[in-house]
Image: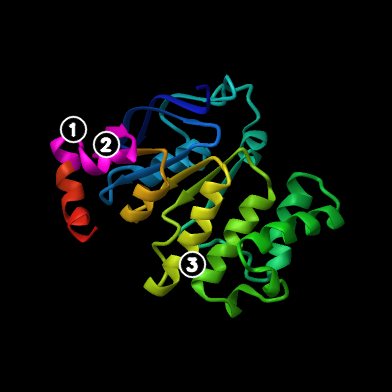
Amino acid sequence: MKGIIDIQHLSKTFGTHEVLKDINFSVNKGEVVCIIGSSGSGKSTLLRCVNLLEKPTSGHIIYNGENILDDKHDIYAYRTKLGMVFQQFNLFNNHDVLSNCVVGQIKVLKRSRYEAESVAMKYLKIVGMDKYINAKPKQLSGGQKQRVAIARALSMEPDVILFDEPTSALDPEMVDEVLKVMKELAESGLTMLIVTHEMEFAKDVSDRVVFMDKGVIAEEGSPEIIFNNPKQERTREFLQRFLKKM
């Protein structure tokens, strides 16, 4: 299967600290890939390198057959093909819910306001936030904000959506509402790359799980293999405390 995104020999160094070391993996069309691992293992840095919020120190990111790290490549055009959902929502506080989902479409995709609003309403309905279009972010709960952030990413109709620990800033009772939306999106065939510490969710929705440890991919495979029969001792150690709860 051809990857939409192929990561080849990617590394990232901050000063003398090598955060990512020789990372190789791909994301295929319609696939849900979850990246798990301890804090500080490089998961979020990897995601930020994939959408070039951080510039990799070396390696290749092949998108639809082209290395987007080549100088000639249009980084901004590439970024429009990747949706990003952050831990802290990153909504525009001075815009209402509908405007949050419209402004990027008009500015970046050059859609008319009518078309942008129509697309935004479609996705706000999918995430259950269509009744809140006139609300400002400060009037919403954390779970509602994150669902708006997901609708905003979907409104750009990207090839892949990246999620960076989308439930980590939420109160426990709000986590389920966001995971439910993400699960429905995964079942709809959306291509998703998710950094998460929600192990049960990763086990349920992933086509593939990538376990990172100290800046390298220590193991990757199907959820069945990673959660039921991991090959690496380090993977077993990491999962031990989670598997006791499941």
Relative to the observer, which residue lies in front, 141 or 71?
Answer: 141
Dot 3 and dot 1 residues touching (CB under 8 Å): no
Q: Residue furthest bottom?
A: 139
Q: Residues within 10 Å of mark 3 (few under 14, many from 20)?
A: some
Give the residue at x 79% y 51%: 106
The residue at the point 53 percent across, 62 percent down is 89
Front: mark 3 or 2:
2
Figure colour scheme: rainbow
Q: CA distance from mark 1 to mark 2?
A: 8 Å
Looking at the rendering, the stretch of residues picked out in magenta corresponds to: 210-235
Q: Position of residue 27 (x, y in %)?
A: 48, 32
Identify whether 8 is placed above or below 232: above
Confirm whether the magenta stretch covers residue 229. yes
Amino acid on which the number 2 mark rests in the picture = Ile
Q: How many marks can you see? A: 3
Mark-to-mark CA distance, 3 and 2: 28 Å
- Residue 177's tag is 3
Residue identifier under label 2: 225
Residue displayed at 74% across by 61% down: 121
The residue indicated by pointer 1 is: 231
53 displayed left or right of 245: right
Q: Residues within 10 Å of mark 2 (few under 14, many from 20)?
A: some
